Structures are given as structure tokens and as C-alpha cells.
Amino acid sequence: MEAALGFSGTHSVMCERAIASSSVRHAEEICFNRLVWARKPCLRKVYHSFYETLRRHLKCVPGKLTVELGSGMGNLKEVIPECVTTDIFPNDWLDREENAYALSLPDNSVGNLILFDVWHHLEYPGTALREFSRVVVEGGQVILFEPAISVLGRLVYGSLHPESLGLREPIKWIAPAGFDPARAPYFAAQSRAARIFQRREVGSWTSEWELVSLEGILSFAYLLSGGFSRPQLYPESFLPAIQWVDRLLGRFTNLLAARLLIVLEKKLSNA
């Protein structure tokens, strides 16, 4: 099956190696997603459009890195080739191993830090954001791409997605004493970004970061593609028409947004 989907024996071995790591569930998801990615051209095109959106929001910070945390399959490099791809365990298709709570990156070395569907996996976002502040240079950015908890998004993600919305769960902003980043359990709460940055349920992040962009993105093309866990509901030939509908209805983000783009800029120390 893997050969038919375009994967070599090497990729299979790398997946087995990843699954043997301490982050079993995350590794299993990546391996499964690589198989889905290979057989769903519509999904690849939709994600390419998401990556283009991220690229347009990059800030030019000479001499500083663009880094993605939780890169998974590493597909962002297709659109942002200079991006340093990372994950919590090593894989041959990624550049380096990094943990969002304890980055090995030097202080003030990053101009753009990208988290694509990663923020809602951080049980202690304040602890992670404090670490981001260490590595991101003043004026640099953290760019988050997350599920949108619009009326439609709440329905779709709440009923059809395997991860919890976590709408009523308390937000544990800072990790407790003795927390070991290397042993952090699997966590998911899809509403986390919307609750923190859209609803402002937590405001302590504003002392160091300025919210420069919060954009709801319609994408029936994404929702009807089935993503990585559901069947695709339209033929590939329909994709341009569905993307046209997305643009036509673009003003109704509160009702229909599928994704949420958040750009945080690190404040200058003298601001």
C-alpha cells in the first residue's frame, strides 16, 4: 500500500523509528497523515493555499531565522523553503528536533516563528510563549494557524474531529513546578487560540506581545476535503468553484470561518 501511495521503504522505516519514540501518538498521526497526503491532491492544494497565506504574513528580519515548530510532514518548505522545520522527535525530512517548552535556539535568533495546528496542543501556552519571547527578536513575530471556532467551525470541529474543543476546560497558563517538557503528555483543545486571542480569556500575554493580525479564513474547500480524518466530499475538478464560494462568502467569518490566523509581534523593550 505504501509503495502504491508513493512511499519508499525508507519512509516506512522512518515512521517505525518515530513511533518507537516517547511521543507515540503524535508520531502515529504523522505517519498516517503522510499516507493521506499522498492520496488526496485536493488536500495538498488547499494546504498550499494556507502556506501561501502564511508566507504573505512573514516579516523581513535580516539575519534572523524563520522557524516552524511541530512541522510534522515538513510540507511548509514547499512554499517557504528557507524555513527551519522541527518537531519533538527527529525525522530525516526535518531539519532539527525542538520542544516548544524548551527550545535549543539561541536568544533573539528568530524573526518568524510559525506554529501550524500546534498551539492547541500546548497545555501550558504561557510557558511556551515565555520561551518564544526568549528566542524571537524584538519586532519579530509568532504566527499561529489554528481551528476557527465560528458557528460552523464549532459544529464541524466539535462533532467531526477526534480532538476535543476544550471550550469549558480551564486554561492552565503556566506549567507547574517540576514540569518536564520532555515528558509532557499528549494534549489537545482546539478552541485554545480563539479563547486566548479572540475572546481574550487570558490577557497576560499582552505585556510582551502585540496582536497585529487576527483573521478568520473561510475554507469550505478544506472542510469538504475531509482533512486527514474524513472522506473527501467533492471531486478535484470542483476545487476552483468551491474556492470561489469561499471568496464570495469571505465577509461572514463569524459564522463560517474554518481557520484562524493570528500574528503576534514582540514588543520593543522601550515601547
Image: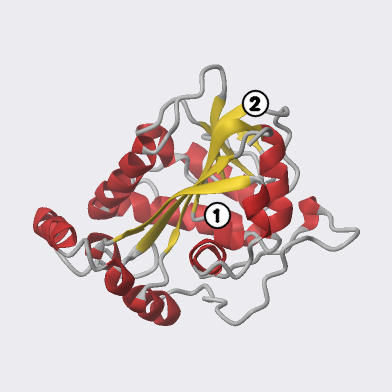
On screen, residue 176 above or below 86: below
User: Residue at 57% of width from left, 77% of height from top?
Assistant: 166
Q: Quadrant of the N terminus?
A: bottom left
Q: Amino acid at mark 1?
A: Val
Which residue carries the number 1 mark?
118
Which residue carries the number 2 mark?
109
| Foreground residue among 39 and 4 | 39
User: Residue at 49% of width from left, 66% of height from top?
Assistant: 194
Is 61 on the left-hand or right-hand side of 51? right
Disc 1 element: loop
User: Residue at 40% of width from left, 66% of height from top?
Assistant: 148
Neighbor class of circle 1 (other Cα within 10 Å; few <14, some 14-19, many 20+) is some
| Foreground residue among 128 and 75 | 128
Disc 2 element: loop
- Outermost residue on the right side: it is 178
- Whether residue 51 is visible to the viewer of this picture, yes or no, is yes
On screen, residue 166 above or below 221: below
Q: Amino acid at mark 2?
A: Ser
Neighbor class of circle 2 (other Cα within 10 Å; few <14, some 14-19, many 20+) is some
Q: Position of residue 58 (x, y in %)?
A: 42, 34
Q: Position of residue 129 (x, y in %)?
A: 67, 49
Q: Quadrant of the C terminus?
A: top right
| Foreground residue among 12 and 197 | 197
Q: Is there CB contact under 8 Å for labels 2 and 1?
A: no
On screen, residue 146 above or below 269: below
**Residue at mark 2 to residue at mark 1: CA–CA distance:** 21 Å
Of label 2 and label 1, which has the lower sequence position? Answer: 2
